[in-house]
């Protein structure tokens, strides 16, 4: 084999040039600079630094240092592009951070929360800018608390016997709309009503209203249910079993058989008065036979019971259960954030800076949703549901270089794939 080396600046990641261009053309660069203002020191603007962070991950990087180790030559080939150092990228996270808030639980325990309303507001505005959310339109929202495992100095032991944070996350479909960080050992119900109130307010301030909300049993508390009911039309919350609830369930005499996901269950509905005597809430109950012979002390049978609290009286039990079960899609969203967009490898040793990173990478994922939709319209082998690894192999990894002809920069790609048909903003 004979080898010939060429010293010309050819990049193996030339697809990133299209991401770079769309980031500016769609208005995201201007939005970030306008919302976050000027940095305290001279040099790079927030929009430039966000763009570099985005491009690191869109090229397969995982940490800020990848820009110096692997990607600087590629990114600096883009005409007019300025590429900051890893130190500058990490310093920006601290600049945009807010101080932690101490929250005291009902039992007197203190926990740290980190609330960054400016960054969350920027995230929502970026979704409006890219047309992924529309003012005046009603949406369905999921809320969950997600353990973010790490071993930084401020990590706290979680209920899963790991260490990390226990962030509260709101999502609309596959778009994260709100992130609020908290200590890993914080009880899921502690100050959750206040967290939800802030999330609903920021959405409402941006013209986004919520039709239906879904939440797991971590939101089953009087003050939380009260907050949710005031900020959406309908809600569906997994109910924690209690003695009074099980006694009420044991009085059900008529059960209806339904098939859900190819499995037969028995379902029924009863009025719910445990927290709110004056409100017309409903408990949708489903049961299935247990694999063991252990008897339930309250019902006198060997059935497994689950219940969903709702104010929806229009849907039947099967519809309520199937709609609630769809919230499992949020688990996939967290998996994508952990493995594709940096949540599994937090960059700093401070909760406040890591919160900025969580929201920024949520914006990154939202922008990815927007951009890959454009790509999938042209590249038939890149579905809009593709994970970022497939996107990098199929789109970003293409040899190319910038050349200057007639005082104009042109991108030369060594491929027959339809990059020329890609219509950017």
Image (cartoon, rainbow, N blue to C red):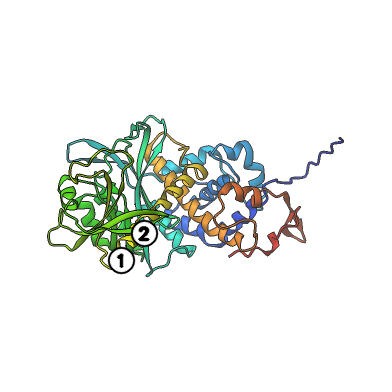
* Residue 240, x across and y down, in percent: 24, 47
Residue in view at x 65 percent, y 59 percent: 379
* Residue 326, x across and y down, in percent: 40, 55
* Residue 17, x across and y down, in percent: 64, 53
Compute the Cα span from label 2 to label 1: 10 Å
Q: Crowding at label 1, few (<14), some or many (≥20) Cα neighbours within 10 Å?
A: few
Q: Residue 95: in sight, yes or no?
A: yes
State which quarter of the image contains the C terminus. bottom right
Q: Residue 171: in sight, yes or no?
A: no
The numbered mark at residue 315 is 1
Q: Out of 265 and 104, give the one closest to the viewer.
A: 265
Mark 2 in CB contact with mark 1 (< 8 angstroms): yes
* Residue 365, x across and y down, in percent: 49, 51
Q: Earlier in the sequence, mark 2 or mark 1?
A: 1
State which quarter of the image contains the N terminus. top right
In this figure, which residue is indicated by the disc labeled 2? 323
Q: Out of 303 and 153, give the one closest to the viewer.
A: 303
The numbered mark at residue 46 is none
Examine the rendered structure and indicate whether residue 421 appears above or below residue 304.
below
């Amino acid at each position: 084999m004979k080898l010939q080396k060429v010293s010309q600046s050819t990049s193996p990641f030339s697809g990133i040039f299209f991401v770079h261009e769309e980031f500016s053309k769609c208005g995201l660069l201007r939005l970030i600079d306008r919302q976050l203002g000027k940095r305290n020191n001279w040099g790079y603007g927030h929009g430039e630094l966000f763009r570099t962070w985005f491009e690191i991950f869109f090229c397969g990087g995982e940490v800020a240092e990848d820009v110096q180790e692997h990607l600087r030559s590629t990114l600096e080939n883009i005409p007019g592009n300025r590429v900051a150092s890893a130190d500058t990228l990490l310093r920006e996270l601290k600049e945009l951070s807010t101080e932690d808030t101490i929250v005291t639980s009902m039992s007197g325990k203190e926990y740290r929360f980190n609330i960054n309303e400016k960054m969350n507001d920027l995230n929502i505005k970026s979704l409006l800018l890219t047309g992924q959310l529309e003012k005046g339109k009603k949406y369905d929202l999921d809320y969950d608390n997600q353990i973010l495992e790490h071993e930084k100095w401020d990590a706290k032991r979680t209920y899963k016997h790991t260490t990390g944070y226990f962030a509260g996350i709101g999502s609309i479909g596959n778009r994260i709309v709100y992130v609020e960080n908290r200590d890993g050992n914080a009880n899921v119900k502690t100050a959750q009503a206040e967290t939800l109130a802030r999330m609903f307010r920021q959405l409402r301030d941006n013209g986004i209203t919520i039709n239906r909300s879904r939440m797991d049993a971590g939101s089953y508390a009087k003050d939380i249910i009260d907050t949710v009911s005031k900020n959406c039309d309908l809600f569906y919350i997994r109910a924690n079993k209690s003695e009074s609830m099980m006694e009420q369930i044991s009085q059900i005499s008529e059960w209806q058989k339904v098939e859900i996901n190819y499995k037969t269950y028995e379902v029924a509905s009863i009025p719910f008065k445990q927290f709110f005597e004056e409100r017309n809430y409903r408990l949708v109950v489903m049961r299935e036979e247990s694999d063991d012979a252990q008897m339930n002390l309250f019902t006198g049978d060997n059935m497994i019971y689950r219940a969903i609290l709702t104010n929806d009286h229009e849907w039947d039990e099967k519809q309520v259960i199937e709609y609630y079960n769809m919230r499992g899609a949020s688990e996939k969203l967290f998996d994508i954030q952990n493995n594709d967009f940096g949540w599994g490898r937090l960059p700093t040793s401070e909760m406040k800076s890591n919160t900025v990173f969580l929201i920024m990478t949520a914006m990154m994922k939202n922008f990815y949703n927007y951009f890959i939709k454009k790509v999938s319209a042209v590249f038939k082998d890149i579905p809009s549901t593709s994970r970022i690894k497939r996107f990098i192999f199929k789109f970003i990894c293409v040899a190319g270089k910038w050349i200057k002809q007639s005082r104009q920069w042109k991108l030369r790609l060594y491929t027959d794939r339809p990059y020329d048909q890609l219509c950017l903003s």
